[in-house]
Image (cartoon, helix red, strand yellow):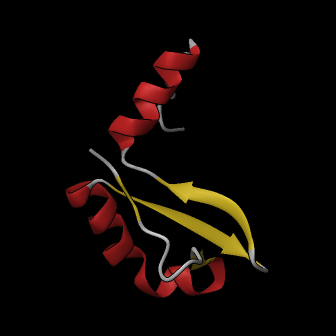
Amino acid sequence: MYTLTNHGGMGVDASKLRYNLREHLDQVERNGVVIPVERWGRRVAVLVPAEWYERALAALGEPEQDGN
């Protein structure tokens, strides 16, 4: 099960993400948290667990990415 974390209605600001990146990655990996990343109030990316991403690729019929 995955949990969407929107930090009070907004995602994590991209400019502030770097300061707590390790903490956010730990939340994603350990707790299955999904974290929207925003720039100028617009969602530009989403941190998701690797398993979720791999399952999404498989569901779309896309080849798995090798991380490069």
| Image-quadrant location for residue 28 | bottom left
28 lies above or below 67: below
The residue at 29%/66% (across/down) is 27
Q: Position of residue 66 (x, y in %)?
A: 47, 29
Judged left or right of residue 65, residue 2 is left
Q: Position of residue 50 (x, y in %)?
A: 37, 42
Q: Position of residue 38 (x, y in %)?
A: 67, 72
The residue at 37%/72% (across/down) is 24
Quarter that holds the N terminus: top left
38 lies above or below 49: below
Q: Residue furthest left?
A: 30
Judged left or right of residue 32, residue 21 is right
Instruction: Depth check: give the residue in front, 32 or 24.
Output: 32
Marker count (numbered) = 0
Q: Residue furthest top?
A: 61
Instruction: Depth check: give the residue in front, 17 or 59.
Output: 59
